[in-house]
Amino acid sequence: MPLDHRRLRGPEESQPPELWAAGTGGVPEKEEEEDAAPQDPCALRPLFARAGLLSQAEGSAYVELGGGTKVLCAAWGPREAAEPGAAAAVGGGRLLCEFYRAPFAGRGARRRPGSAAERDAEREAAAALREALEPAVRLARYPRARLAVSALLLQDGGSALAAAISAAALALADAGVEMYDLVVGCALCRSPGPAAAWMLQPGEPEERRAVARLTVALLPALNQVSAVLGGGQGSPPDDWAQALRLGLDGCHRLYPVLRQSLLRASRRRDAAAAAATTTTA
Amino acid sequence: MAALDPPLAPRPTVAGVPARSPRSLNGAFSPSPRPPPRRAVGGERAPARCRFRDGVASRGGRRLRTVEPLEYYRRFLKENCRPDGRELGEFRATTVNIGSITTADGSALVKLGNTTVICGVKAELAAPAVDSANKGYIVPNVELPSLCSTRFRSGPPGEEAQAASQFIADVIENSQIIAKEDLCVANGKLAWVLYCDIICLDYDGNILDASAFALLAALKNVQLPSVTINEETGLSEVNLKQKNPLIIRKHPVATSFAIFDDTLLIVDPTAEEEDLATGTVTIVTDEEGRLCSVHKPGGSPLTGAKLQDCITRAVTRHKEVKKLIDKVIKSIKPK
């Protein structure tokens, strides 16, 4: 691996302690499995969403899922496009997305920032994010401009991409970018086994063991799907159709929570602006 | 003009946030409490300052702030206060949230006013270096992603991030916060590596203070599983159920000052103040009132007397910070 001169170097190689937790380690995992009560496949984990919390970004949102997934997202409104040629050809604005995983976000080994594998994974996730958000943003209203969205995953407890999609849509709305609707993301997975059912919003252990994963992004008010991402072990098309329906249902149920957080954020902002003007008056 | 007027009994501006649920950050992201409006108590000069502030924060004042920021700031500094209502020696409200990232072995989120920094520590095992067979590793890494401010672009770490990482590495080295020998499991064979990743979520100045504070809080939160080397097979066995906290030997705390016009020193600068300043100084002290390091990357020269003032203020700040960390650590329920 080429030396990364910009970061402080530790040892060449290091392994997480879980690798050596041989005898004693295997058991706790199974205990976890049994402890978690057989989850209702249609149950949604509690979601906490808050918009408008960073001072330096024009719009920001923080989404936290019950299993521990924490995503922070910041968005910036229209700015001058860096390469006017390319944007003018397309005839609308451009949406630039970024997706970072914190090195301490995953349960296993620490991800080394700056490695090639890490960069590829980030690029893939950023492309997925863009795919899900583009249909919702009115890019035609911002010709020759670029809108930037940057998502940071602080802790991965399953359904990370879905949470990031919701957070990014909230952040864009918070920044005042014109959108057709909020995008709500929902993840599903299917565990191994012949008769396994699809499960909504899997936790981290379920996602690791899953043989098929799916992330659905929906514009609930318009009832239009903006992205379907995923794959895995094949199964009859009816199965996938059923999974899709389950995902869309989950998105519809999450929508009110996100709208509430956006309303609260704008109320807070109005109250702060009013307080500022009264002190000067 | 005296830099820091009679070291004021600094008003306690620190508060620990008892997170609603220790595993979630949903309490930590509320806007930091603004310093309460000061009343004339015990001979403090409050009322005149408030009146002055209201006069300038009008429409004309806002225009001045955009067009001539230095002039705008000078008007406030002449009255020994700052546009956001703080005194020259006053810190912004500090909040700490510990142990919220469960995938990391130790974590802490620190908010200094608007500046938000999160530190996650992950412990891994590696073979120690050949020339120091009984020492483990601590690898700090400060990241300033494009998320935290428009001045940073995405990609490999820029100058400021590299400088901050080096500063944190120096603090760890100079203050001996953890003895590397404590991290060694088996001489020459196995040692702990602590990867301390400090990510800035919101950049509003004074990143060094916040990072050092977050690092200290996260290290205090780390629980390492116990490792034993099996005598017969020579393999190591990790017991994830039995965890021990790290032995923190010293508690270094950093205090940053910005130098204005070569003469005036202000504590805890915001991003705007840092841009207008002619120099910065960061002082790191430990709990016995001893100096661990002074970081002064160029900028306007400083007389010995002013430096002494800074050190005194840093020692006071250390006591506040230590009290806050202790309070928060005690309030965490054991895992």
Image (cartoon, coloured by chain):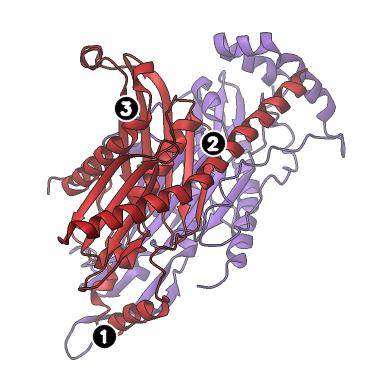
Chain colours: A red, B purple
Report if residue B308 is visible in the image. yes
User: Do the residues indicated by labels 3 and 2 lie within the same chain of the protein?
Assistant: yes
Front disc: 1 or 2? 2
Give the quarter of the figure containing the N terminus of chain B. Answer: top right
Neighbour class for label 1 at 10 Å: few (<14), some, many (≥20)?
Answer: few
B131 left or right of A272 in image: left
Q: Where in the figure is residue A264, as x and y percent of width and height?
A: 61, 39
Q: Quadrant of residue B32?
A: top right
Cα–Cα gap, marks 3 and 2: 20 Å
Q: Earlier in the sequence, mark 1 or mark 3?
A: 1
Closest to the observer: B335 or A220? A220
Mark 3 lies on residue: A95
| Amino acid type, residue under disc 1 in the picture | Gly
Mark 1 lies on residue: A23
| Amino acid type, residue under disc 2 in the picture | Gly
Tell me whether circle 3 and circle 2 mark residues in contact (CB < 8 Å): no
Front disc: 3 or 2? 3
Q: Going 47% across and 52% down the picture, which residue do you hit?
A: A64
Q: Earlier in the sequence, mark 1 or mark 2?
A: 1
User: Do the residues indicated by labels 1 and 3 lie within the same chain of the protein?
Assistant: yes
Mark 2 lies on residue: A52
The chain letter for the residue carrying disc 1 is A
Cα–Cα gap, marks 1 and 2: 47 Å
> Residue A147: which numbered mark, if any?
none
The answer to whether residue A72 is above or below residue B21 is: above
Question: Could you say whether the residue bearing mark 1 is in a helix, strand or loop?
Answer: helix
Cα–Cα gap, marks 1 and 3: 50 Å
Residue found at the very far bottom of the displayed protein: B232
Q: Where in the figure is residue B76, as x and y percent of width and height?
A: 69, 19
